[in-house]
Amino acid sequence: MEKKIYRIAAIGVFAALVFVSNYMSVPVPVAIGDVSRIHFGNIFCLLSGFVLGPVGGGLAAGIGSALYDLTNPAYIASAPFTFAFKFLLAAVCGWAAYAHGAKAENHGQNILAAAAGSVAYMILYLGKAFIQGILLGSELGTVLTALTTKLVTSSINAVIAVVVSVPLCAVVRLALKKSHLLDKMA
């Protein structure tokens, strides 16, 4: 029972980190009236996957990101998609980082895990943007211009997230291990 309480608390703490880090952003206008942005949220989505594994990390990333969307009028309609897509961002990362018993302790595997999670998210995010643009009746050229902008911002977000989350993972996991919290959350 105690482990479940620690695990739920950790998911809540990481969801809060994801939520708050989404506010650290630079908005980028998109051709079809949409908004994209460069932000730090994905760093903590990946970190959630590294520390909490696929399910716990996915829940923290999805909840924190969806709550951010629900508090921002520009994104409120996207909250359900954001929950699913960010869940998968962290879940793919966590799954790959924990594969073969690595438990997010293999630096090289963590780099690949973060990249895999980021690529999975970008495919979902850009696919949704394309379908949404077409369904809204936008011209194909306009949709492709918007996708190009979103691809650039998503790529920047992905690179920042991978570069920062992997070393941050090592530091956070070491601190959690020394305080014996990592064992209590497992």
Image (spheres, rainbow, N blue to C red):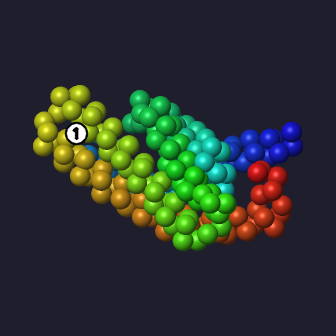
Whole-percent x, y for residue 16 in the image: 63, 46
Q: Quadrant of the N terminus?
A: top right
Residue type at tag 1: Ile
Residue at (58% x, 71% y) in the render? 107
Which residue reaches farthest right? Answer: 2
Would you say residue 50 is visible in this rendering? Answer: no
Quadrant in the rendering for residue 154: bottom left
131, above or below 124, in the image = above
Residue sticking out furthest to the front: 100
Image spot of residue 157 (x, y percent): 41, 58
Which residue does the image show at 26% across and 52% down from the upper left? 149
Q: Between residue 100 and residue 171, name the one nearer to us.
A: 100
Residue 17 x, y percent position in the rendering? 62, 51
Label tally? 1
In this rendering, the answer to whether 142 lies above or below 168 is: above
Query: Which residue is drawn at the image coordinates 38% and 50% (left, top)?
Result: 122
The vertical placement of 185 against 174, above or below, is above
**Residue drawn 73% across the image and 68% down it:** 174
Which quadrant of the figure has residue 180? Answer: bottom right
Horizontal side, residue 45 vs residue 10: left or right? left
Using a 10 Å C-alpha cutoff, classify the residue at mark 1 as few (fewer than 14 neighbours), some (14 to 19) or many (20 or more). Answer: some
- Name the element at disc 1: loop
Q: Of 141 and 112, which appears nearest the observer?
A: 112
Residue 153 position in % (x across, y down): 34, 55
Visible in this render: residue 53? yes
Residue at mark 1: 32
